[in-house]
Amino acid sequence: PSLEEPSRPKAVVELKGVEKRFAAFTALRRMDLTIREGEFFTLLGPSGCGKTTTLRLIAGFDLPSEGQILIAGQDVSNIPAHLRPVHTVFQNYALFPHMTVLDNVAFPLTVRRIGRAERLERARAALDLVQMGSFAARKPSQLSGGQQQRVALARALVNEPRVLLLDEPLGALDLKLRKEMQAELKAMQRRLGITFVFVTHDQEEALSMSDRIALMKSGEIVQLDTPTGLYDRPANAYVADFIGETNMIPARVISQEGDVTLVEAMGTRLRVSGNHGHVAGAEVQMAIRPERVSDDMRETENSAEGVLADVEFIGTDLRMVYRMTDGSRVVMRQQNSGRAVPQLGETRRLGFRQQDLRLFGR
Ligand code: ATP
């Protein structure tokens, strides 16, 4: 290896050809996955795509039908859940209602027969980590949802796991608290340096917290990438559609000219960066993010005319829907700069930079 090669963090969880079947149903299809030491890794996807199944296999609550699971280089396929160096936090925190907060957090150490003094000391330290030290004597019922979730986290951290598995841990919280806890969880993960494997169906949550995301569909990983990679370089129309908002505009390929594809869409001709390997005449989808559509023509190779059909205010942004001359619909998102808002029914020229356009097969 060359000297310039950056040192790669070690693999901490590895799935090799892992398949999970429930009777005739295949929940996971030959999955290969490497999660690195110290990263915030997220399994993202719609309901039923296999996120929880993947997490349960890593935890050891279920066994794979095929394939191998390694944790810190060790094959754990035959190691029971409670002996694996991982800990799981679920959406329903499952705190013991009759125990104090401190005893709840100390409980995993009782199971491991650690002496009382050490147990309480470690439980206090774990509570301090989640800023719940002053609530040690309370019962769970005397805490808010967010505080209960923090106690559940402390209980997961008390064993100093190498890997923390989190299954929609913020799902039960209201939106405001959820946002707060997202930031806290992320900060805590950075501070502790523990590997987090996080499950969510909420793409915004995944984008804001993760180092890397595996986007899943029907038991398979569709794209494994950084948040910006998924957002800016979606591998296919499914990813472009699942992550953020995307305009999908019907287009027809005219020709390929070097590194540019010439297409017909929205009643005009446009240049699209990149050799997408689509043959002339192919019916495709042309994707562009609403915030990349612009009415500033200085930097654009492409433009098309549309009539403003709808305007929505979204806090700091304006979301405008245009109907193009061929009937296709284009959403443009702009900062609400205080400039005059265009009138409904007004015709405008919209710009599409060639590097912001992507083509997908239909
Ligand atoms: P959600 O976001 O709704 O929790 P998920 O992505 O976590 O979804 P999984 O719970 O992993 O999905 O389930 C994947 C698929 O496997 C689903 O179709 C589910 O019905 C099926 N499945 C999960 N557990 C079992 C089981 N014990 N027996 C039969 N089918 C199961």
Image (cartoon, rainbow, N blue to C red):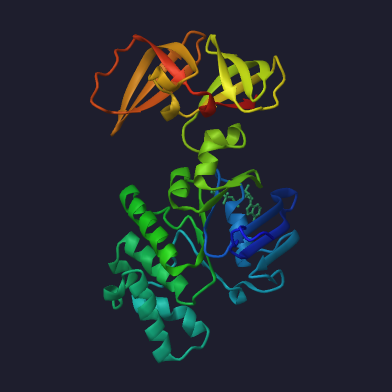
Quadrant holding the N terminus: bottom right
Please state the horizontal and vertical placement of residue 158, each as a whole percent of the image.
45, 76
Which image quadrant is residue 134 in? bottom left
230 or 48, which is in the foreground? 230
Quadrant holding the C terminus: top right
Furthest-front residue in this view: 3
Please state the horizontal and vertical placement of residue 322, each as a whole percent of the image.
41, 16
Task: Give the answer, above or below, for where 247 lies relative to 31.
Answer: above
Q: Can residue 153 be seen from the camera position used here?
A: yes
Task: Give the answer, above or below, for where 196 lies relative to 216.
Answer: below
Left or right? Give the position of 83 relative to 30: left
179 or 240, which is in the foreground? 240
Identify which residue is drawn at 31% across, 49% down.
176
Identify which residue is drawn at 24% across, 22% down.
339
Q: Can residue 100 be seen from the camera position used here?
A: no
Please state the horizontal and vertical placement of residue 217, each as a whole percent of the image.
62, 43
Which image quadrant is residue 10 in? bottom right
Please state the horizontal and vertical placement of residue 41, each as a whole percent of the image.
53, 56
